């Protein structure tokens, strides 16, 4: 995949979920929300690394870490960042257990969207893990946000608009506030959910 028409590109795994406009929509939302030159950032579910890589190219001063549960995609993300000379820390980790000693000012995620048992499964298991809530559900994502988000930090999650009520219910259980549910740029029927700790709205 080409990056910004500058001759930069990343490698993808043909057996895994392909990069889509969702990645660029999440990138745009993150850059519009936080314009600091120095920021500690976590991505949940990095896949081949595209979102973290685009953020690192746009904000070289950001300290970016990213979690991925699938070993082959974690390795590919590391390779992509290394080829581009980017200092991103890709971690082979399960977000359901992840807890950092130092919280993050920004957390971003384009997580699996579809509930287990809904829709048609692919014969390729890597795609199923990326699309369906097989390894992490919406509540798991929000629990990870709660554990790892700095007190005045921001989280941006990309979900279909059909999951809006599910997000509201799960956020209430996790003591997180939904600041906004905004249309995702370049995508139909998808939302960028902006979340903060309860009582930290601004």
Image: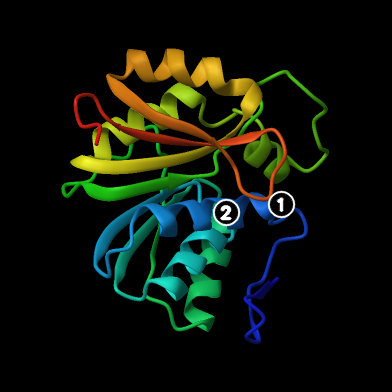
Residue situated in front as seen by the camera: 136 or 58: 58
Query: Regarding mark 1 in the picture, which secondary structure is present there?
Result: loop
Q: Is residue 117 above or below residue 66?
A: above
- x then y, percent, for residue 25: 58, 52
Specify few, some or many for label 1: CA neighbours under 10 Å numbering under 14, 14-19, or 20 or more: some
- x then y, percent, for residue 73: 58, 57
Residue 164 seen anywhere in this rendered image of the structure: yes
Query: Regarding mark 2 in the picture, which secondary structure is present there?
Result: loop
Q: Is residue 183 left or right of residue 2?
A: left
Q: Is residue 50 left or right of residue 195?
A: right
Query: Which mark identifies residue 47?
Result: 2
Q: Residue at x 25, y 49 (%)?
A: 104
Displayed quadrant of residue 171: top left
Q: Earlier in the sequence, mark 2 or mark 1?
A: 1
- x then y, percent, for residue 167: 48, 21
- x then y, percent, for residue 81: 49, 74
Q: Is residue 57 left or right of residue 1?
A: left
Residue 150 seen anywhere in this rendered image of the structure: no
Q: Residue at label 1?
A: 16
* For the residues bearing labels 2 and 1, Cβ distance under 8 angstroms: yes
Q: Is residue 88 above or below residue 113?
A: below
Displayed quadrant of residue 139: top left
């Amino acid at each position: 995949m080409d990056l910004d028409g500058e001759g930069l590109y990343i490698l993808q795994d043909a057996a895994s979920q392909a990069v889509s406009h969702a990645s660029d929509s999440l990138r745009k939302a993150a850059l519009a929300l936080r314009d600091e030159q120095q920021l500690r950032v976590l991505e949940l579910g990095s896949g081949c690394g595209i979102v973290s890589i685009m953020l690192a190219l746009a904000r070289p001063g950001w300290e970016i870490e990213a979690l991925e549960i699938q070993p082959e995609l974690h390795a590919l993300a590391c390779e992509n960042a290394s080829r581009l000379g980017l200092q991103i820390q890709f971690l082979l980790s399960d977000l359901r257990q992840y807890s950092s000693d130092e919280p993050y000012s920004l957390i971003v995620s384009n997580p699996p969207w579809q509930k287990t048992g809904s829709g048609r499964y692919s014969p390729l298991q890597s795609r199923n893990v990326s699309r369906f809530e097989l390894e992490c559900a919406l509540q798991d994502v929000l629990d990870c946000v709660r554990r790892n988000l700095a007190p005045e930090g921001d989280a941006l999650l990309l979900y279909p608009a059909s999951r809006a009520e599910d997000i509201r219910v799960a956020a209430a259980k996790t003591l997180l506030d939904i600041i906004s549910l905004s249309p995702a740029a370049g995508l139909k029927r998808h939302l960028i959910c902006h979340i903060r700790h309860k009582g930290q709205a601004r």
